[in-house]
Amino acid sequence: MPPPPDTTGHVTLPPGGPVGIPSAPQAPAVPDPTATTLAVLLIGPAGAGKTSVAKYWADHRRVPTAHISLDDVREWVRSGFADPQTGWNDNSEAQYRLARRTCGFAARNFLANGISCILDDAVFPDRPVVGLGGWKRHVGPGLLPVVLLPGLDVVLERNAERSGNRRLGDEEVARIHGRMAGWYGSGLPIIDNSQLDVPETARVLDDVLTRAIASPPKW
């Protein structure tokens, strides 16, 4: 007897097949990012609002979209969790690398099944191999990176509202924010959401992605 047909809707992920660079649809002439299957990487420091914006953006798209949070995946490790706040070491570095690979695989699997995704991570411009280079290897050259970088005072205020191991000390927040400023002049799109709420930031993100689809950034 032949095996029953697969009715789950699952599409097998091609081995090593990263997402390609998205092409702008032929009609309408201006690409609509809300109706296009995309892979987006939202970059920013702690307190920039990455998670809130990513969730809202994913919730309000016209096509199926997943939000993949690096911090959430990293915290899947319960016993043996390496918290960088207690001291950065080889174990915490390894858990970050593992989480990024896991997120990258999940993103490719969603995309292979026709589901867009947005990932969020604090990627530093002074670590290109670990940062953008790693995400490009994990997801593919079609990944669209966007930097979310409000002013330091806003980041400090938002970070103070966080709890648990996601709340950082003010000095650490300032140090990370200073490193993130290196994205200026990189060619990546940067959104200063200091004066924007989450829905407004999501609308600006759509505008940025419209331009990125039409003319993918060199990275």
Image (cartoon, rainbow, N blue to C red):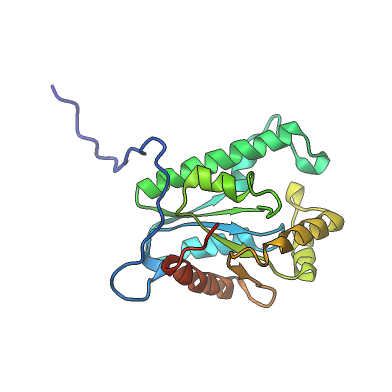
User: Quadrant of residue 142 in the image?
Assistant: bottom left
| Left or right of residue 217, residue 28 in this image | left
Count of marks overlaid on the render: 0
Q: Residue at x 69, y 48 (%)?
A: 127
The quarter in which the N terminus is drawn is top left
The residue nearer to you, when weighing 153 against 140, is 140
Q: Residue at x 70, y 74 (%)?
A: 194
Q: Which residue is drawn at 36% across and 46% down?
A: 112
Q: Mark yes or no: residue 76 visible.
A: no
The residue nearer to you, when weighing 198 against 30, is 30
Q: Where is residue 188 in the image (x, y as percent from the top left)?
A: 58, 64
**Residue that lies at the very extreme toward the left in this rendered image:** 1
| Left or right of residue 77, residue 219 in this image | left
Rendered view: 68 above or below 87:
below
Q: Mark yes or no: residue 41 visible.
A: yes
| Left or right of residue 10, residue 94 in this image | right
Q: Where is residue 45 in the image (x, y as percent from the top left)?
A: 71, 58
